[in-house]
Image: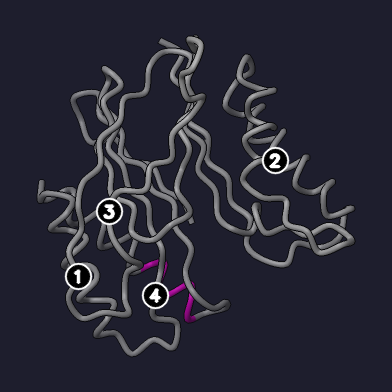
Amino acid sequence: FYDFHELGEGTLGLAIGDASGHGLPAALLVRDVVTGLRMGIERELKIAHVFTKLNQVIHRSRLSSRFVSVFYGELEADGNLVYINAGHQPPILFFKDLRPGEASDTELSTGGTVIGPLPETRFRRGFARVRPGEALVMCTDGILERRDAGSEFFGVDRLRATVRESMSQTAEAIVERIFDASSRWGAGRPWEDDATVVVLKRDA
């Protein structure tokens, strides 16, 4: 799943996640997670506290699908990003205007474990800055674990290469390039898992 909502004063809330299992139990889990996130944020609670409480609720649920990975961030108008990664495939922030020896991107992995399995867990906030021309790419493992005829995964390195070749394009175009590259890697076969991609690109 993915979700966006405006928080006021130029701040955007964004989330991506992946529930265990399939069908109705997974759908109910996603509903509870998205609702819980939105309710907690609307009450202006700190995001680490929201995640701790949400984990307790999901852990006590009787759903057969009982864990979910979630990345949630709040992006301010000046590009400052506060986030928590609860066991999700780390989103990648792609930099622009690199200098020799500098990294070309960074993974946003600070947070904690997946939501649900443990009765008590704590989460830490991570911080990043999205500058003009930079792109934040989020996906589920259905993209990365797409297999070719030899059962080799599409993988993070090919994702990075695809985005790097598309950095001059719009966020929508980058999403399309990622899906096209991953689909072709699997030779057009049906997707084996849920495939979700979210790209946020700061223009100014």
Report the residue at 59% width, 51% height from top. 196
* Residue wearing tag 2: 158
Q: As shown in the figure, which amino acid type bears the numbered disc 3?
A: Gly
Q: Which residue is mark 3?
A: 111
Residue 79: quarter of image: top left
Quarter of the image with the C terminus is top left
> Which disc is residue 165 wearing?
none
Distance between the alpha carbons at the discs numbered 3 and 1:
11 Å
Q: Nearer the viewer, residue 23 or 192?
A: 192
Q: Residue at x 35, y 67 (%)?
A: 114
Question: Is the residue marked by circle 4 packed among few (<14), some (14-19), or many (20+) residues within 10 Å?
Answer: many
Check disc 4 and report its element: helix, strand or loop. loop
Mark 2, secondary structure of its residue: helix
Give the residue displayed 44% in from the left and 58% down from the top.
17
Q: Which residue position is annotated with label 1?
A: 121
29 or 108, which lies in front?
Answer: 108
Label 4 – label 1 distance at C-alpha: 13 Å
The tag earlier along the polypeptide, 3 or 1, is 3
